[in-house]
Amino acid sequence: MNPLNLDNIDLQLLNQLQTDASLSNQTLAERVFVSPPTCLRRVKRLKDVGLIEREIAVLSVDTLAGSIGYGLTAVVEITLDRQDQTALEAFEQRVQHEDAVQQCYRVSPGPDFCLIVHATSMPDYLALTQRLFTADANVRNVKSFFSIKRSKFGARVPLPGVP
């Protein structure tokens, strides 16, 4: 089922953009074998329908760690006492406002949430945990796993029919 009626050109455009969103319209058009005006129109449509949420630069955490910090990455499992819709949404709202929380997933089974957190240091991480978890009476359990090496990182979604 394809409710957005994506064709092969749309999929190729999405694939190219999720690999390198800084491509010029001309280069992008050449790579997917369409005219620049067609390319521009199609990319605008993909943005308008919400397939392209935003374009960002991915920073090197390892390089930043050597100059300004952010050398601590944690995967954090959170279990709440109450899992009603209001409690789950309240927790999601709390983490939305924390820059250190890079990703938040509501998961099942097991914990209620998994977070990806970047902190400058262990004291910075401790302050975050006190703000988000200790101060929230609904947080029952927190389990943190600290990254010792990033082996792979990506945000690319595999698309059907596109190598």
Image (cartoon, rainbow, N blue to C red):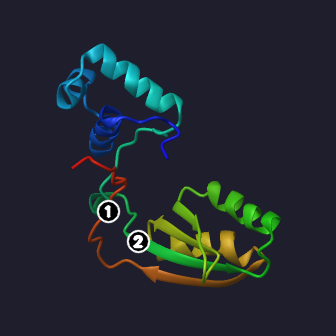
CB within 8 Å, label 2 to label 1: no
Q: Residue at x 24, y 22 (%)?
A: 34
Which of discs 2 and 1 lies nearer the camera? The answer is 1
**Dot 2, how many residues are within 10 Å of its Cα: few (below 14), some (14-19), or many (20+)?**
some
Q: Which mark is residue 104?
A: none
Q: Residue furthest top?
A: 37
User: Disc 2 marks which amino acid?
Assistant: Leu
Where residue 81 sits in the image (x, y, percent)? 77, 82
- In the rendered image, is residue 152 in sight? yes
User: Disc 1 marks which amino acid?
Assistant: Phe
Could you tell me how far apart the alpha carbons at marks 2 and 1 are, in whole angstroms? 15 Å
Q: Closest to the observer: 112 or 157?
A: 157
**Dot 1, how many residues are within 10 Å of its Cα: few (below 14), some (14-19), or many (20+)?**
few
Q: Secondary structure at mark 1?
A: loop
Q: Residue at x 46, y 35 (%)?
A: 5
Residue to which mark 2 is pinned: 72
Above or below residue 162? Residue 145 is below
**Can you tell which quarter of the image residue 71 is in?**
bottom left
Identify the mark nearer the N-term, 2 or 1: 2
Q: Residue at x 56, y 65 (%)?
A: 105
Where residue 152 sits in the image (x, y, percent)? 28, 67
Count of numbered tags: 2
